[in-house]
Amino acid sequence: MESFFYGRRFPRWLLGIYAGWFLVWAWRPWMFKDWVLEHVLTVLWVGFLILTYRRFPLSNISYTLIFIHLSLHTIGAHYTYALVPYNDWFRALLGSGPNDWFGLERNHYDRLVHFSFGLLLAYPVREVFLRIAGVKGFWGYYLPVDLTMSFSMLYELIEWAAAMLYGGELGQAYLGTQGDVWDAHKDMGLATIGAIVSMSVVAFINWKFNRRFGEEWRESLEIKGREPLGEVKLLDLMREEERNKSS
C-alpha cells in the first residue's frame, strides 16, 4: 500500500476513479444546462492537470486533495447545489440529518464545497508557490491563503456573470444564493477559513518536524532590498537605458 501511494501510477488511478465517478453522476442530471455550466471549469481544470503532469507533477497528496474536492463538486453539479439531498441521505442512515440537528432550513451543501475549496486546494497552491516561486517561511503559508481568497472571489464573479448572462431558472440554479443576499460573502469567508485551517495544519506539522521552521520564518520576513522601488527603480532603468544608447 505504501509503494502504491508513493508511486507515479497513483495519480492515474485517481484520474480513472474520478472518470468513473463523473460518469455515474452524469447520468440524468436534474438540470442538464446547469450541469454543463458547472462542469466547464471542471473539464478545463482536469485537462490542465493532465497536460502538466509530465513536466510538473504534483505530489500524490495534492492530487488526492484535488480529487476529493472535484468529487464533492460533481455531486453538487448533478443535483444543482441548492437541491443536493444530503439531509435525506442522513435521515435514511441515522434517522435524522444535519439540518434537523442544527435547526437549519437552507441547503448547505454549497457551503461545504466552498469550505472544502479552501481546505483542500490551499495545499496544492502552496506546493506550486514553493516549487516554482521558491517562497519560504511565512510567505509559504500566507500566499496560499491569499490566492485561495482571490480564486474564491473570482469564482463568485463568474457565477454573477453567468447569472446575468443566462438569467431565469438556469441563472438562479448556477448562482445558488437560495435567497441569501450575503451568499457570496459567506462562500468566500468559508473558503478563507478552510485555507487558514489547512495552512495551520501544515505549519504545525512543519513546526513539529522541521528544525529550521522558526529560522525560515525570520529569514522570510527580513528586508531583502534596501532601496525602494517605484519611481526610484524607474529612474535607475531610465538612466541605464540612456547609458546603453550612448555606449
Image: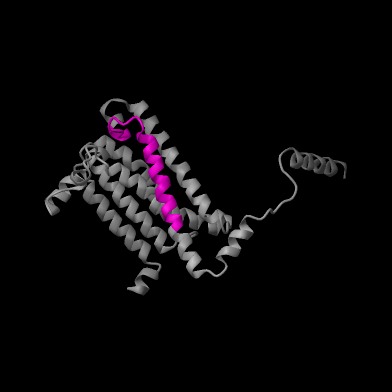
- Residue farthest toward the right in the current orientation of the protein: 246
Q: How far across and how far down the image is residue 106, in percent?
A: 24, 37
Please, is residue 228 above or below residue 63 in the view?
Answer: above
Q: Which image quarter holds the C terminus?
A: top right
In the image, residue 194 lies in the stretch drawn in magenta? yes
Which image quadrant is residue 100 in? top left
Image point 66% across, 55% down: which residue?
Answer: 222
Q: How far across and how far down the image is residue 226, in percent?
A: 74, 50
Nearer to the camera, 124 or 243: 124
Nearer to the camera, 141 or 33: 141
Q: How far across and how far down the image is residue 136, in percent?
A: 57, 59
Color scheme of the displayed model:
one colour
Please, is residue 48 above or below residue 32 in the view?
Answer: below
The secondary structure making up most of the magenta span is helix
Q: How far across and how far down the image is residue 42, in percent?
A: 36, 46
Q: Which residues are magenta?
A: 173-200
Q: How many callouts does the rendering have?
A: 0
Camera sees residue 58: no
Please, is residue 86 above or below residue 7 in the view?
Answer: above
Q: Is residue 92 left or right of residue 142?
A: left
Image point 20% across, 38% down: which residue?
Answer: 30
Nearer to the camera, 157 or 217: 217
- Residue farthest toward the front in the current orientation of the protein: 102
Q: Is residue 32 left or right of residue 142?
A: left
Which image quadrant is residue 231 in? top right
In the image, residue 204 lies in the stretch drawn in magenta? no
Q: Which image quarter holds the N terminus?
A: bottom left
Camera sees residue 185: yes
